[in-house]
Image: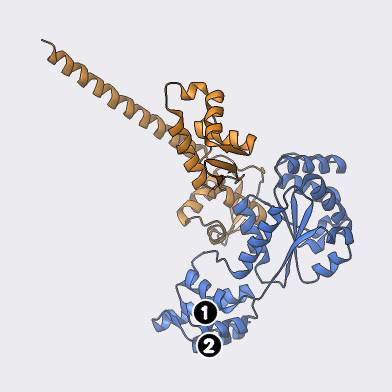
């Protein structure tokens, strides 16, 4: 389950990290106390149970007894691009096949990632097609183009959803107006 | 001819994963892991794959560090995410230690034989104070080398030897990388001709894929394997 800071799931995760082991009731009580604004006017039990299901599925918690779970301290799976970055840094000179073999990335994704690094002037292509790391900033640079694209998609989706709600509302108002003589 | 780039979890890879899991069990305690084996058995590739997959630190030891502890510490600090490591020995050591205490990621040191024995004392201090595991990867003489360092040897919690690649691994690798159906007899021929060296197995699989393509089949016989082995010898 991806970590999104401030989300209900992430706050549950923090509770487990802090307490180690918790029962469902303890987690429910802790969440009501820790995030009253998130649970106001909502049924907390199903929310907690849904998060527990996801954490259990992701191996982040383990069930130790009936309705009791323990934090398994499982780390987030390493992202594909982070794996490629790690391989590139450890080998300095790689070919696409190495990246694909050692990380499981697809060819188009590996190529796109290398292009992104070329854009940041961190790598150069050698005559035989291999890729050489020429500048190592330690931390992997962000793919700003992709981040902008994703942000635009999110905004577009939010606008569409809002537009649909407005249309639904307008339709309901119209129906009400027609119903009233 | 190119093989399909796929990382095959051979018996050695599975043993390596088991070693790393074993080290995880003693979390918080100063400990070393030891991995050794002949060149060409896939130690480095496995270590790089594991470290990328598990966010561990992989560092290939360079001979140039044999005279400079500071260079070694600075490189280790950068691998741990210190953007500008201090240029003094004690401060660099402290920077490494701080990072490891906050996030005790396993450190995998490849070609460890190149380090001067006095570096082992640094590493012992690091693992004791941070609780992060340090794994040494090297060739066969590594065991003898470390057995003389009693204080290091007593902290070796897990060890494994990279064994020659076996016929079942060859069958699986040929299927994954080239879509070939290698029979048991053929796999034994490849295993014998390669001497268990993974690089040579890869070379033989390329030859086999070419032979199979020419014959329009996917099934590899022992005879084909012998031809591939002979071709490789001619090319050597």
Say which chain tag 2 marks: B
Other residues around mark 1 within 10 Å, as few (<14) / some (14–19) / many (≥20): many
* Residue B104 at x, y percent in the picture: 72, 45
Q: Which residue is mark 1?
A: B207
Left or right position of A41 against B88: left
Q: Earlier in the sequence, mark 1 or mark 2?
A: 1
Letter of the chain shown orange in the rendering: A
Q: Is residue B118 above or below residue A120?
A: below
- Tell me which residue sits at (57%, 85%) in the image: B189
Q: Nearer the viewer, residue B168 or A126?
A: B168
Asked if one can make out residue A141 in the rendered structure from this viewpoint, the answer is yes
Left or right position of B203 against B155: left
Letter of the chain shown blue in the rendering: B
Dots 1, 2 in contact, CB < 8 A: yes
Left or right position of A71 against B110: left
Say which chain tag 1 marks: B
- Tell me which residue sits at (76%, 48%) in the image: B75
Q: Nearer the viewer, residue B33 or A141?
A: B33
Other residues around mark 2 within 10 Å, as few (<14) / some (14–19) / many (≥20): some
* Residue B27 at x, y percent in the picture: 72, 49
**Label 2 SS:** helix
Q: Which residue is mark 2?
A: B227
């Amino acid at each position: 389950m991806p970590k999104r800071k401030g989300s209900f799931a992430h706050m549950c995760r923090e509770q487990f990290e802090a307490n180690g082991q918790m029962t469902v009731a303890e987690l429910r009580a802790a969440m009501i106390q820790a995030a009253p604004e998130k649970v106001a006017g909502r049924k907390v039990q199903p929310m907690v149970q849904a998060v527990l299901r996801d954490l259990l599925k992701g191996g982040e918690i383990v069930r130790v007894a009936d309705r009791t779970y323990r934090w398994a301290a499982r780390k987030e799976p390493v992202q594909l691009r982070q794996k490629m970055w790690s391989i590139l840094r450890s080998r300095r000179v790689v070919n696409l096949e190495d990246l694909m073999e050692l990380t499981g990335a697809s060819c188009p994704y590996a190529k796109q990632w290398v292009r992104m690094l070329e854009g940041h002037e961190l790598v150069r292509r050698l005559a035989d097609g291999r890729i050489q790391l020429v500048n190592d900033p330690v931390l992997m640079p962000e793919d700003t183009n992709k981040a902008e694209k994703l942000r635009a998609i999110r905004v577009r989706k939010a606008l569409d959803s809002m537009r649909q709600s407005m249309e639904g509302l307008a339709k309901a108002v119209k129906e009400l107006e027609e119903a009233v003589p | 001819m190119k093989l399909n780039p796929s990382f095959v979890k051979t018996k050695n890879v599975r043993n390596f994963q088991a070693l790393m899991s074993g080290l995880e069990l003693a979390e918080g305690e100063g400990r070393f892991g030891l991995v050794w084996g002949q060149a060409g058995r896939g130690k480095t590739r496995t270590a790089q794959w594991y470290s990328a997959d598990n966010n561990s630190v992989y560092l290939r030891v360079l001979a140039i560090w044999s005279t400079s502890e500071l260079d070694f510490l600075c490189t280790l600090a950068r691998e741990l995410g210190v953007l500008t490591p201090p240029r003094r020995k004690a401060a660099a050591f402290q920077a490494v230690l701080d990072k490891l205490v906050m996030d005790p990621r396993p450190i995998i040191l490849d070609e460890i034989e190149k380090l001067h024995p006095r570096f082992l004392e640094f590493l012992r201090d690091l693992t004791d104070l941070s609780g992060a595991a340090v794994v040494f990867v090297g060739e066969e003489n590594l065991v003898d080398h470390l057995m003389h360092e009693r204080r290091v040897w007593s902290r070796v919690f897990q060890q494994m030897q990279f064994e020659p690649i076996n016929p079942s691994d060859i069958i699986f690798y040929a299927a994954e990388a080239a879509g070939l159906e290698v029979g048991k007899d053929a796999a034994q021929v490849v295993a014998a001709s390669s001497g268990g060296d993974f690089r040579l197995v890869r070379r033989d699989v390329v030859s086999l894929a070419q032979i199979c393509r020419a014959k329009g089949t996917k099934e590899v016989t022992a005879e084909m394997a012998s031809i591939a082995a002979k071709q490789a010898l001619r090319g050597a």
